[in-house]
Image: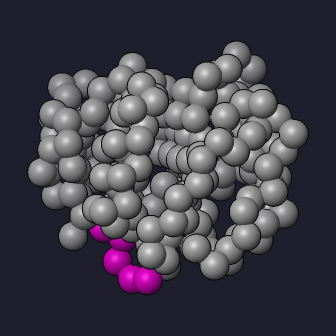
Amino acid sequence: MSRIIAGVAGGTPLANVPGSATRPTTDRVKEALFSRLEALDAIVDARVLDLFAGSGSLGVESASRGAASVDLVEFDARASDICQRNADLINQVLGGKTVTVHRSKVESFLDRTQDGIRWDLVFLDPPYPLDESALGSVLSKLAPFLDAAAVVVVERSSRTPEPDWPETLERFAEKKYGETRLWLAEPA
């Protein structure tokens, strides 16, 4: 069972997506990631986007730690329902609507995003079958909606190659945690 690790809702258990179609980020990886993000001052008052959200655990963790707004994007119906349950939970704790769930394919969501919208922190944990060119396409579509000081976190299997970054994004960190590898990038 995953949980919110820290912040105003720290320790709160989260609903998980049943089955093996999604891979929840382990508490160990989540703790290390958020420690790094806090050191970068990337969470408090951030506008957060969680693409391929699964259960939405990274987005709701951000909300618990002080993000101003969080958008969870998930297409799978079961996963989207779990995102909504977790969003409702954190919104209730926070006493407002900080987390919003969008049931949509990531590409369609980005295609519909209006000019002028900017995110400060973005999580991408795409399904393993998503190939590198498709991930590169998503990163290219995302780039125009990033704040100048944004942080983009890509979570993949440690056996997959580094994402094919568009010219508008530049990797600044990489870390492996067992079967999981995280890449952090920023606007170039």
| Viewer-side residue, 103 vs 148 | 148
- Residue 172 rendering spot, x and y as whole percentages: 65, 42
Where residue 22 appears, as percent x and y from the top left, is 47, 73
- Name which residue lies at 39% across and 83% down: 19
Residue 28 location (% of width, % of height): 30, 63
Q: Residue furthest left?
A: 11
Query: In the displayed structure, does residue 41 sit left or right of residue 184?
Result: left
Instruction: Identify the main secondary structure in magenta.
Output: loop
Which residue does the image show at 12% across and 51% down from the upper left?
A: 11
Q: Residue at x 28, y 33 (%)?
A: 65
Q: How is the image coloured?
A: one colour
Q: Is residue 141 left or right of residue 94?
A: right
**Residue 169: which quarter of the image?**
top right
The C terminus lies in which quarter of the figure? top right
Q: Is residue 133 above or below residue 188?
A: below
Q: Residue at x 44, y 83 (%)?
A: 20
Q: Position of residue 134 (x, y in %)?
A: 80, 62
> Which residue lies most toward the right here?
167
Can residue 120 be seen in this snapshot?
yes
Where residue 185 sits, quadrant-wise, is: top right
**The N terminus is located in which quarter?**
bottom left
Q: How many marks?
A: 0
Instruction: Indicate the quadrant where residue 117 lies.
Output: top right
Query: Is residue 19 on the magenta stretch?
Result: yes
**For residue 117, side relative to residue 9 (left or right):** right
**Is 169 covered by the magenta stretch?**
no
Q: Is residue 69 visible?
A: no
Q: Residue furthest bottom?
A: 20
Work out whether residue 168 or residue 52 is closer to the camera in this orientation and state it: 168
For the magenta stretch, what is the residue range?
A: 15-20
Q: Front-most of 130 and 33?
A: 33
